[in-house]
Image: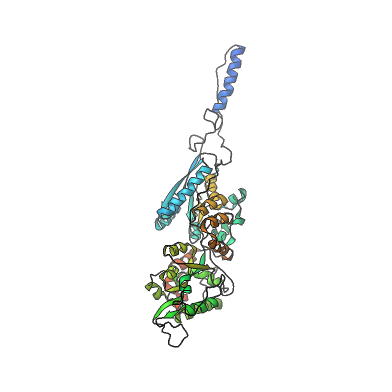
Amino acid sequence: MTRIVGRVRQGLASGNTKQQKKGKCSLEARKGWAWASTMMLAMALVAAGCGNGTNGNNKPDTTGESTGNNQSTSSEKPQEKVTITYSQWGTAEELQRTQELLDTFMKVYPNITVKLEGKDWGTYWDGLTAGASGGILPDVMKTSFAYVSKYAELGIFKELDGLLDSHSFDRSAIADGMLSMHQFGGKQVSLPIDANVIMFYYNKALFDDPATNPKQASYPSTEPTWEEVLDIATKMTLDTNGKNPGEDGFDSNNIKQWGMSTVPGADLGMFEPILYSNGAKLINDDDTVALNTPEAREVIDFFIKATQQGVNTSPAQIEGMGGVQNLAITTGKVAMNLAGSWNVAHYADANIDYGITHVPKFQSTQTVIQPAGVAMSASTKHEEAAFTLMSWLAGPEGQTELAKQGFSIPSNSQAADAYLETAGAEFKIFLDAQAFGISAPYSVKKTDLVFTHGTQILRDPLSGNGDVEAAIADLQAALQ
């Protein structure tokens, strides 16, 4: 992707200056009409200098410092000079791109200075936990869709609905599925700023080469079914003798090329939209495991059978190819795999020619959008400036600047054209996929299920190596 440098529109934020109590100014009376007239004029000038919110030059005091009665409050307006902090996790490269965005913001709002605090993933969340226990929190902070509920329960996020309404922020430009991932208790507590989506990828080189595609299997369609994908994967699976599953003499112990890699237990977050496509769920609203329904078991049994037939990779086979399901097609040994939109960078690094489809379906096409967001500290003393930054990052201007960087998919549809201009028309499918996003917010227990217990307990059973019923029961017990 090329990086396009756009012109930055500069402007001033609107708002009213704060008012202070007027000081008293007095002058000694003098005799004489002329002298009195002169001093009356002087009194008017001095009164203007001593009056509310001025510095003697008839300009508003915009230092943002708390001196005397000029206390900093949570209702400051953007035209007052204030300094706020913005904190996020990320690599050096990611933080540099964020700094570029903040530099653009500060040109548009020159009276707001934003200090970036960058941390690694683990340190970042430890810092928010400490802040919730009485420590210092940033004014604005990046959030992960998977940790919204956990930190909202700690009370560190400010509810945003009132501010969004009073500032007429256009939420219709952000898909409902993304907004819901950043809500807690029915309230908006953070705003999505990117739109990573789960997709399905295939290695074109394997399909185009008769040696690796002797059955001449076609590319998967744009919105494939799992039955279609299974048929293609069966034709693309080869043992060391060049035979496919189902043919006489096929040796499942000596497979050299697999048709697909979709390991349900390896990443339950990616597996969730596949369940939804069959009318099933990963977890119920009461935080109980939802994998024992007929609809869920139909999906699970499909992948167990495909793995047992040798068409789909097992966890052990993925480990032998580097251990990352998302990158299976880069090995030259797997034709198709489930992965995130962010993985295209890895495919480009691997120099493979790949195609993209929507996540295959059982009944309906579904995906999951995994958006990062921005939240405001409930204890910020600079509410107006903090909201100005948040609404810019999530609004059309900030999202357009993000899109021009060419590294992230914007969450705001008003930045779609800028994204396609930078990334290329072939990535329009990422934007189209947002219409298929499920509304599946993360509770604290769901976060534990997906990122802690699920992989440990379900990885092997969901591939046919273990008792599925017992594993589901163990998972439910782990969530108690």
Front in this rendered view, residue 375 or 43: 375
- Residue 215 in view: yes
Q: Nearer the viewer, residue 450 or 12?
A: 12
Determine whether, in the image, residue 370 is placed left or right of residue 126. right
- Dividing the picture into quadrants, the one containing residue 321 is bottom left
Q: Residue furthest bottom?
A: 248
162 relative to 452, above or below? above
Residue 480 visible, this orientation: no
Colour scheme shown: rainbow
Q: Position of residue 465 (x, y in %)?
A: 42, 79
Image position, residue 312 (x, y; %): 46, 77
Q: Which residue, as the protein is rendered here, is positioned at the far top? A: 32
- Residue 446 against residue 170 in the figure, above or below: below
**Foreground pick, 371 / 100:** 100
State how many labels appear: 0
Above or below, 280 relative to 398: below
Residue 254 picture location, percent across and down: 39, 81
Percent x, y of residue 330: 42, 68
Say if 95 sits above or below 452 in the image: above
